[in-house]
Amino acid sequence: MAGNTFGTLFKLTTFGESHGPALGGIIDGCPAGLTLDFEAIQLELQRRKPGQSAIVTQRKEADEVQFLSGIFEGKTTGTPIGFAIQNTNQKSEDYNAIQNSYRPSHADYVYEKKYGIRDYRGGGRSSARETASRVVAGAIAKQLLSDVKINAFVSSVGDIFVEKPYQALDFNLIESNPVRCPDPETAERMEALIRAVRKEGDTIGGTITCVIQNVPIGWGEPVFDKLHAQLGKAMLSINAVKGFEYGSGFCGARMKGSEHNDLYNEDGTTRTNLSGGIQGGISNGMDIYFRVAFKPVATLIQEQEVLTNDGRIEVQQGKGRHDPCVVPRAVPIVEAMTALVLADFYLLEKTNKL
């Protein structure tokens, strides 16, 4: 299987399956001498881990990271940073019923057709549990990017949207509720919807907005390695993501150029920011913001048709422990992938100036 490595200078390779003994990763390219805050790294994992509230999967995992290499006396050595996260609460028997069938909108069918074999226990490598490794690497990337602020939050669940612009929100409130929405009133409505959908044995989708502040002018490479192109690739690599837009996004397609252009101030800043902080694929010093769409979780705790490996259609009911809505736990994943992209461009910019 190819495609397990992300990044150019700051690289992450992940390994492991949902129901294997452990998962983890190797970070290559992290500069030497970076003093790590291990509590901050573990806190990021706590934000992503299962079982953290009543509206997420009730799988109980400590998700404690163990560093195996690349760190000495609390500082990075410049060599590969290896780490592992043990799986301790698998219930693989929940998946026995699907070993000979393919669940709709999962990777089951295509994995078996491509590789001739699949790990049916929780989806194996296709499980979103793989993203725990991304969160560890992203937490280290955040510490490398000490001046850059990355804040992601849930901006919609189903047809319930945060109506306020992000400038009117208090990012300190993101962690104040299980939905991770900084608008308390909207968060309550979102939580009620998720609970109702869960009670029905169904699932629902939503969106996450991410705001990046203090990125200097000049990050990003023209043509194929545009900053927004790499951010888009990073977001679309996350399980269940169906769409990415930055700046004015699809709304900008309805506007005239006279409405959309960001006019300059004398100091080089812009009066509006429909560009989303990126022009020509390069950061312009303004806030970078984008939105990511997540589909409803494909596993339903209700009956639906499945395809068997001998070509029959059967009715099965989903089993196991699953999120009724993935977006609350995906917030730290979005932040982690954002940090990995920015760490790459940070190091590339330093290299260009040597």
Image: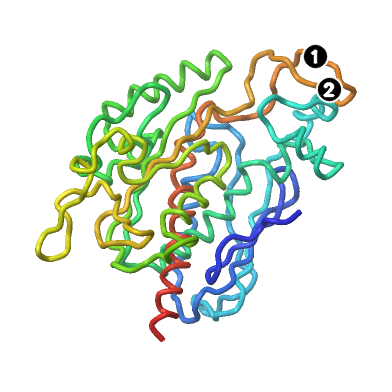
71, 98: nearer the viewer: 98
Q: Secondary structure at mark 1?
A: strand
Q: Position of residue 264 (x, y in %)?
A: 15, 57
User: Which residue is under mark 2?
Assistant: 308
> Relative to residue 310, is residue 113 depicted above or below?
below
The span from disc 1 to disc 2 (Cα, nearest Å) is: 7 Å
- Please report whichever mark, 1 or 2, sits nearer to the chain's N-terminal start: 2
Q: Position of residue 329 (x, y in %)?
A: 48, 40
Horizontal side, residue 73 vs residue 173: left or right: right
Q: Is residue 43 visible?
A: no
Q: Is residue 87 visible?
A: yes
Q: Residue at x 42, y 59 (%)?
A: 227
Q: Residue furthest right?
A: 310
Q: Position of residue 186 (x, y in %)?
A: 29, 27
Q: Which mark is residue 314?
A: 1
281, 256: nearer the viewer: 256
Give residue 299's quadrant in the image: top right
Instruction: Name the colouring of the figure.
Output: rainbow
Marks 1 and 2 in Cβ contact (< 8 Å)? yes
Callout 1 crowding tier (Cα within 10 Å): few <14, some 14–19, many ≥20: few
Q: Residue at x 51, y 52 (%)?
A: 234
Q: Secondary structure at mark 2?
A: strand
The kind of residue tagged 2 is Thr
Q: Residue at x 38, y 21 (%)?
A: 159
